[in-house]
Image (cartoon, coloured by chain):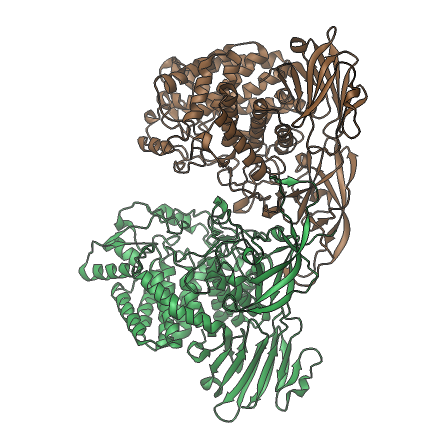
Chain colours: A green, B brown
């Protein structure tokens, strides 16, 4: 990434609050969880696995047993990565010391040849035993019973996630070096990556990872170190994937053990039904898709490979034009946490995993590197403020994997088809993928908000704070905003001396119907604007959803973005069966929803008048939000106990109250709907 | 049942046509299927299993192998039962000879002690091997690999369906005796039932069937033979069920083989989470629920057990007021083909198995024996004309298991959550439960249409034909109607001599807003009626949805029912999330639907004006139907490729065309919806 993390101190009321919560609650909780220090919580075993592997390597053998998911190592990696970012925002010597100790432990668990994966090390020199079922009831582990000795490294690329774990540790190594300057973990992951290069390139081992992640990680390592081997290996995994689409079946035939017993013929699930360049649809496990495409976009950027770039653009379109929820949620099918078919977007059974929305942000961010288009920034913003933030309570202590667009008490979390769609966030999960992903995203949000390319600084997301650009442009920019509730964003330039000679580019969100940009009070973009009034030496141009302001910015210069924050009604393509006859509301980047709590207990019996402009009001509830109220109707409850009736329902006028979607389910279990029924013609 | 089957010759244009199709197409096809004589079709093995078991018993051993589902025997039983009814309607010496031969074969496969189940006989004296997956892809068979000798009778009541198979053979035995007077199969099933009595009553074996069916079958056998042992055994299975709710878990621990590996802890699936009398909700596999309740209602009728009757009424209410589709479909969850939670009735992923709707008719018919309430007849009619008849193409050559209320080409039959919800009917299924169930229902429909209780003859369903009542009332009744398309039903009385002294009771369907009944042209029921004008000696009374006409009916007497057939709009309880903002249309007992075929290719983008009265027109299409047309709108397709948009959709007026639901999917794959979006307020 760009390395803006340590140089953007966020001070707005919104994102800064989340960063504080991550620092105060999430990272400490996560640390305790992986150390098995939380009473009553599901055992993690993640740190204990590293200790056992270190002991095994030091003594040649251990009696200790690997515990947890086959990818348990990645929890340690994700915690280290999150902590790295967090240390820049909230320096903490004690936390840094514990990170250093953890890194030392990881180093001790690394085999002499660079191999690092406690599951396989303990399979050889200790024992493995997997948790049978996740405490969340979602993740079933069904280990085969092969003698441990038969679990050889790289013998189960389809299921065993060792390249996935390696990827996360690589990301952590790069992040820790970037954020602290310490290269201990970087050295470890370079040795690990060299070992993988040796295996897959030098020795020519066949295959590709069942769960992509290493591709984007290797590209980060390449970007940081400049070592071209890492790019080559990343490109290799992209190039070979799906070329032999039968690889996993053949791999399975060669071994007599399994993790979950996944079906190697379900190639779409693993994104290997065709070579990456030939993929036509986003299919299978949603997180894998966007992790893979993030790596592919990185490789396309470095290689200039047009066919790979086209594949990324094709799949971007398929996702965002056919398979994405209004919230930026992806993976509409809970079976396989997966993409399904075009326009199949059920609201109540949605999977829309928090991690998948985070992955969509990864992908969008990489697409921005391939080409500056506002739509990439728009989707990144949509996913962030809706599908990602809904993954966590406002207090940062409870988490959703699954972010449905409709919640039905009595059905959600209860019916067999809704077991996954919990109506309230639980504390933690045995499969701890989503909470740590939020924990590493939020403190690193600066790298999503800003990008420097050539002489241009891009503002993709609108977050208040102070951005240090000493090295790039000899100064800093102060961003002031009360986003996402207010639409004004001002950028003040503070050169260290003289002027900052640069192009400043700001995203013009598509959702804002009436956007204005002012330079020193002169309207240079928007209705009736006079770009020529920008002042001497400034050039203004617009391209693909960005406004470019080129010139020499002095201490007196200020760019002001004014977005149209009026509430909007949204319609879905009629091919989305679940949304026919319904509308949703948005305000700025925020999707809204109606909860029973604000609507006399129920929302299914409510209808709204699409033509009416909602009333928008500030409320101190839920950490401070803008609520929306729209005229509607309630269908009256009937006295009779019957499912179907033929007389027209009795209808009374009622105002319908809405809150931002990210804040739902913070006040106990209740009905929730994003897509509201339109009032019917009389 | 009543034994009206052979004495009601149906001659209307609707049901008679279906009976002809069953005779001409379904029963011959079914026979060929179970004999493995259809090229290209999935192997059945059903008859071959009986031959192998007979050979094994005669020679003490066979090399032959059991093939197919563990309940494959029931296919032979269902065919024999259907053929029995059919032989009365369409006498056919050749078919009867083949039935007799089949019965002789069944007799040869019966063990000396009366035991009859080819799976277990071949497990002991031959081999068993199950088909791996049904040709329909729906039914996965996962046999354990225990030595065949360990598959002992009654050792897997949870999964092995031997009591289910016994139940179907008992039903066939009773039917064949009733319809042909031949008692060969009746003798076989009496010996079998005696063997079961010996096992479960005399020897006191614990347990109860995983798939109910034997309870209602034993009650039929009791009703026919008067042998109280069969009633006792039926009552026993009802009484012990769920008392030890842990029974299946303990049973599983005692054996080292399995059929599907079902979870014995999922007691709700098997309706044994509580004793039958204490069940509060219809839970688990829908067919099992209604088969069980049919048996329970029969036992309650015979025993006069109020607590059992109350349980039946409680579950009836739960099903019909909380868990039933408009079509009479039940089992809204495809996982487990099961009931889920109250008001959870998704349209596109519905299971709504044909067999379950047939089972609901069984249950309704038995509830009528417990008490005459119009609602039982109403539901029986709803299920028959919608959820049951939709299970078959109009030609009787293709079949649905699953009857969704919405079909989405590109998603239905394709997405992982929609694999079961095929958009067109396939030819046959490896698990051939639904087609044979239709085959035995239609030729026996007379016993659902009429009931004699005391001196009263009830007309529950409205079907044209001639009913022989010589034995009961010394005459016959001719019913003339063009139901379900026209609402007039006339009953003419033809005493053999003198008068027919009786009470004639006719159902007054709740859906008919303006019903009239005339006796000899005098209106005796309905607005402005004069019951006193019925004529001398006739008494008129109404009770719980039935009109009772008591008197002496002579050859000049005619009762005419005039039902209000005007099209109706139907609303669902707002707690049914899938139906909010939508309405459905009905006409008479028929639920309507809109297919893309009649609506320029698509229906999801259509909206209807609930206030408009539909135009109803006769059409010769689809074997003759009344079509419905209602004013509506179409949301115009947009040029842009995008999922969500904020400008109001362009809307054009368009008429929306509908056909009866039972006739859907007879013209290839296309969009279908029962619940249509209401046009929105402007």
| Residue at screen point 66% across, 53% down | A581
Rendered view: A644 above or below A394: above
From the viewer's perspective, tell me whether residue B432 is left or right of residue A1: right
Q: Residue furthest right?
A: B521
Q: Where's residue B497, x and y in %? A: 74, 6
Rendered view: A552 above or below B673: below
The answer to whether any part of residue B162 appears in the image is no
Residue B521 position by quadrant = top right
Q: Residue furthest left?
A: A59
From the viewer's perspective, tell me whether residue B609 is left or right of residue A499: right
**Nearer to the camera, B12 or B265:** B265
Q: Where's residue A321, x and y in %? A: 60, 60
- Count of labels in the image: 0
Q: Residue furthest front?
A: B532
**Nearer to the camera, B51 or A345:** A345
From the viewer's perspective, tell me whether residue B619 is left or right of residue A83: right
Q: Where's residue B495, x and y in %? A: 73, 9
Rendered view: A352 above or below A188: above
Q: Residue furthest top?
A: B497
The N terminus of chain A lies in which quarter of the figure? bottom left
Q: Where's residue B191, x and y in %? A: 43, 13
């Amino acid at each position: 990434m760009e390395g803006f993390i340590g140089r953007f101190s966020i001070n707005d009321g919104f994102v800064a609050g989340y960063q504080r919560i991550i620092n105060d609650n999430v990272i400490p909780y996560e640390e305790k969880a992986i150390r098995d220090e939380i009473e009553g919580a599901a055992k993690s075993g993640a740190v204990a696995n590293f200790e056992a592997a270190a002991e095994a390597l030091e003594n040649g053998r251990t009696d200790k047993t690997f515990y947890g998911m086959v990818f348990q190592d990645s929890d340690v990696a994700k915690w280290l990565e999150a902590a790295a970012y967090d240390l820049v925002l909230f320096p903490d010597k004690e936390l840094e010391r514990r990170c250093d100790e953890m890194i030392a432990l990881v180093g001790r668990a690394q085999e002499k040849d660079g191999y690092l994966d406690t599951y396989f090390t303990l399979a050889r020199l200790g024992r493995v035993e997997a948790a049978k079922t996740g405490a969340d009831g979602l993740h079933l582990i069904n280990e085969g019973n092969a003698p441990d000795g038969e679990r050889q490294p790289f013998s189960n690329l389809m299921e065993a996630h060792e390249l996935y774990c390696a990827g996360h540790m690589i990301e952590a190594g790069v992040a820790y070096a970037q954020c602290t300057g310490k290269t201990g973990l970087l050295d470890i992951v370079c040795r690990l990556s060299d070992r993988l290069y040796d295996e897959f390139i030098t020795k020519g081992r066949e295959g590709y990872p069942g769960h992509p992640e290493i591709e984007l990680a290797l590209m980060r390592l390449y970007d940081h170190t400049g070592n071209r081997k890492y790019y080559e290996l990343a490109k290799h995994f992209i190039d070979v994937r799906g070329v032999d689409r039968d690889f996993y079946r053949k791999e399975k035939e060669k071994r007599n053990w399994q993790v979950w017993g996944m079906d190697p013929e379900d190639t779409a699930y693993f994104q290997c039904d065709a070579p990456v360049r030939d993929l036509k649809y986003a299919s299978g496990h949603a997180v894998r898709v966007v992790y893979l495409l993030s790596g592919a976009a990185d490789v396309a950027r470095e290689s200039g490979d047009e066919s790979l770039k086209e594949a990324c653009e094709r799949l971007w379109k398929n996702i965002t034009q056919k398979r994405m929820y209004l919230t930026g949620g992806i993976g509409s099918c809970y079976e396989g946490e997966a993409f399904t078919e075009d326009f199949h977007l059920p609201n109540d059974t949605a999977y829309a995993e928090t991690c998948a929305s985070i992955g969509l942000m990864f992908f969008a961010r990489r697409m921005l590197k391939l080409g500056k288009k506002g739509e990439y920034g728009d989707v990144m913003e949509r996913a962030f403020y809706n599908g990602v933030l809904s993954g966590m309570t406002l207090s940062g202590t409870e988490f959703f994997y699954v972010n449905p667009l409709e919640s039905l008490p009595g059905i959600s979390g209860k019916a067999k088809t809704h077991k996954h769609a919990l109506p309230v966030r639980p504390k933690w999960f045995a499969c701890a993928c989503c909470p740590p992903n939020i924990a590493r995203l939020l403190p690193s949000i600066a790298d999503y908000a800003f990008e420097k390319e050539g002489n241009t600084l891009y503002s993709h997301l609108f977050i208040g704070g102070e951005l240090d650009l000493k090295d790039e442009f000899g100064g800093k920019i102060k961003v002031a905003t009360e986003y996402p509730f207010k639409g004004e964003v001002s950028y003040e330039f503070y050169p260290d001396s003289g002027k900052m000679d640069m192009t400043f580019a700001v995203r013009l969100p598509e959702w804002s119907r009436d956007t204005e940009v002012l330079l020193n009070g002169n309207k240079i973009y928007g209705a009736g604007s006079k770009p020529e009034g920008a002042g001497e030496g400034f050039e203004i141009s617009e391209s693909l959803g960005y406004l470019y302001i080129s010139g020499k910015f002095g201490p007196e210069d200020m760019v002001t973005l004014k977005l149209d924050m009026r509430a909007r009604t949204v319609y879905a393509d009629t091919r989305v069966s679940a949304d026919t006859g319904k509308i949703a509301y948005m305000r700025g980047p925020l999707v809204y929803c109606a909860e029973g709590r604000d609507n006399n207990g129920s929302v299914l019996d409510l209808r709204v008048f699409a033509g009416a402009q909602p009333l928008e009001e500030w409320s101190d509830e839920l950490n401070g939000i803008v609520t929306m109220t729209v005229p509607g109707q309630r269908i009256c409850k009937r006295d009779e106990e019957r499912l179907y009736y033929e007389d027209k329902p009795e209808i009374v006028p009622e105002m319908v109250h809405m809150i931002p979607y990210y804040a739902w389910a913070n006040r106990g279990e209740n009905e929730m709907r994003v897509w509201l029924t339109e009032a019917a013609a009389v």
